[in-house]
Each structure stands twice: as C-alpha cells, then as structure tokens.
Image (cartoon, rainbow, N blue to C red):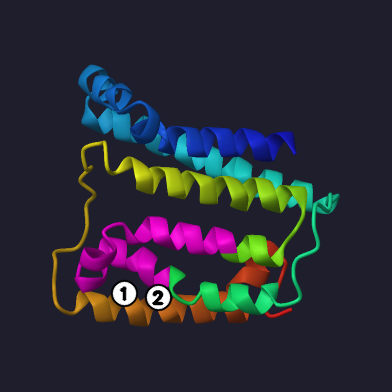
Amino acid sequence: MTILVTGLVLFLGIHSIAIVAPQVRVRAVAALGGNAWQGLYSLLSVAGFALILYGFHRARQAPVALYLPPSWGRQAALVLMVPVFPLILAAYFPGRIKAAMQHPMLLAVMLWALAHLLSNGTLADVLLFGLFLLWAVLDRISFSWRPPQVIRTAPPARANDLIAVLAGLALYAVFLGWAHRWLFTVSPMG
C-alpha cells in the first residue's frame, strides 16, 4: 500500500501545484525555464503514475474490503464510463463540447473515479479513485481563483466534436472488450 500512496502523493502532488500554490509554478518556470519545468513536471508525473500502477497491482494481491459495492454498481459504472473517453479527447480537440464543459478532462476524471467507486470497495480502490475524485473536484473549483493555463491542443474545428465522440467511443469499446482486462487483469463486463 505504501507504493500506491507514494505514487498518489507524487502524481497528485505535482498536479496540485496549480491548485494550492500557483506561484510555485511561476517561480519554477522563471528559475528553470519553461522547458526544464515541463521536463521535471513530466518526469515526476510519469514516476508517480508508474508507482500508482505498480502499487495498485500489489495492493490488489491482498485486498482489504471497506464496503460491498451496490448490486447495480457495475451497470452504473458501465454507463458512467460512456462519456469518459470522448470528454478526454474533447479536451485536446476543441469544439462545442470543450466550450460547453470548459474543462472536459476534469469531468472525465470525476466520472471515471465515481464509476470505479460504485463498482469496487477495497481500500486500494478508495484511495486511488477517491483521491482522484477529490483532486478533480478541487481542481475544478480552483479555476474560479487562478489564472487559466494554456494547454496545447489541435486547432479548433467543426469536426473536432465528431472526432472526440467517435474516437472516444471506439476507445471505450476497446477498453470494454480487451484493453481493461489486458492492462488490469479485470474485465469490466464481469
């Protein structure tokens, strides 16, 4: 469990700088330069993500049950996951979806985390998905008091929404049919 917690602290910590201490980012970019900061940020993010994956895998070997998910949890999770991949892609293919949602990636993280909390009830699940849900909610709230950050995306286009939806649904189908089981040894279909 220590590896999972370390990964979560590292990954969510680096992603929370903009929420709790935006001036740290500004000072780091000024001191290191934009590219060096992005490199350090990316390195810490990848390291944290790798620790999360490894730590979650290890924690699942000896699960600690906290609650029994509701009988309808798996079906609800399957429905909640439908818009997740399209929303992630909409963040990088700006169109009407991104304009309406403003921050579609954060909504995707919230839905992903909630879906998994409804269908899983171990300590590792609550740590992983619960902390990601909390982080996404706090990050979304923080947009009211912090300056927006520019994220590189495709140029805005009318076809971007269609690309996000069709490619997102295709990715979801791949995850349902094969990738989730291959990556995480668990089929979302039961």
- Asked if 42 appears above or below 74 in the picture, the reply is above
Q: Can residue 120 be seen at all in this image of the molecule?
A: yes
Q: Position of residue 89 (x, y in %)?
A: 34, 67
Figure quadrant of the N terminus? top right
Q: Seen from this angle, which residue lies furthest top?
A: 31
User: Judging from the image, what secondary structure is the residue with disc 1 in?
Assistant: helix
Crowding at mark 2 (Cα within 10 Å: few <14, some 14-19, many 20+): many
- Principal secondary structure, stretch drawn in magenta: helix
Residue at 39% in and 29% down = 20
Figure quadrant of the C terminus? bottom right
Q: Which residues fall within the magenta stretch?
A: 85-114
Q: Amino acid at mark 2?
A: Gly
Question: Spatial distance from mark 2 to mark 1, Cα to Cα?
Answer: 6 Å
Q: Is residue 56 left or right of residue 47?
A: right
Q: Position of residue 38 (x, y in %)?
A: 31, 35
Kindly indicate whether the residue at mark 1 contacts the one at mark 2 (C-beta within 8 angstroms). yes
Residue at 29% in and 44% down = 143
Crowding at mark 1 (Cα within 10 Å: few <14, some 14-19, many 20+): many
- Residue at mark 2: 168
The circle drawn on residue 44 is none
5, 143: nearer the viewer: 143
User: Judging from the image, what secondary structure is the residue with disc 2 in?
Assistant: helix
- Residue at mark 1: 164
